[in-house]
Image (cartoon, grey):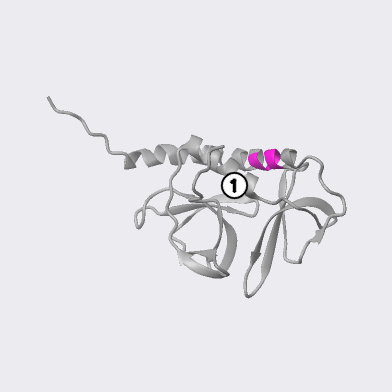
Amino acid sequence: MLILPMQTLYPIKFKAGNKFRYGFYIWSESWKDTDDFFYIWEKNMFKPYFRNKTYRFDNGEWKETYPEYHYKAQEFEKALEQFVNSLPLNAVVFQGKRVFLIHSFVDDMYTEHWAFDPYRLDIYYAFAEPRESLVKENNIDMVRHRLYEYLLNHIYERLKFADIHAQHLIIVKRDRK
């Protein structure tokens, strides 16, 4: 199995407007102070944010970070598969539904929990601690596959755009004769 370094797909807190939001940093579409768009998975949305401060949870505290990582489409698919396989996806109950916990964002001020419903193909979020489901999943591989497909379906068009957009970073050397 290929193990890729986890350059992206990690939980972040970022400021949008006058409040903080939680999400997963997916990739950047340019470098440093140029057109620095971060592409972020935020609840049920996948979208770029322009020049926002981001914070990564590190050793029990939120530290400011400047994420910058570009993917080629095939590299990203492998990294996404590795990310989904690393999630515990424990069965929990949200709003009376049995779903699978993706991540709990814990902060000094509040906590936000995200879960995935593999049958409705939807992300649920709650601020209260989810209850553990008494019904366990027999086929966690199916849940992982559906989450992978859900994520890939929502971001693949943008990934192809980012792949093309990154081409201006590649310098082609020509031999002059």
What's the residue at 43%, 60% (across, down)? 66
Mark 1 is on which residue type? Answer: Phe
Which quarter of the image is occupied by the C terminus? top left
Which quarter of the image is occupied by the N terminus? top right
Q: Magenta part of the protein: which range? A: 144-148
Name which quarter of the figure residue 79 lies in.
Answer: top right
> Measured from the top left, where is residue 64 in percent x and y?
47, 67
View extreme (front): residue: 1
Residue 87 shown left or right of residue 30 in the figure: right
Secondary-structure class at tag 1: helix
Residue under label 1, please give it. Answer: 83
Q: Is residue 22 above or below residue 102?
A: below
What's the residue at 32%, 39% (across, down)? 170
What's the residue at 50%, 44% (across, down)? 4
> Measured from the top left, where is residue 136 in percent x and y?
83, 48
For the stretch drawn in magenta, the main secondary structure is helix
Residue 145 shown left or right of residue 51 in the figure: right
> Measured from the top left, where is residue 138 in percent x and y?
82, 41
> Measured from the top left, where is residue 14 in percent x and y?
53, 63
Q: Residues within 10 Å of mark 1 (few under 14, many from 20)?
A: some
Q: How many marks?
A: 1
Q: Is residue 144 above or below residue 56?
A: above
View extreme (bottom): residue: 108
Residue 137 shown left or right of residue 148 in the figure: right
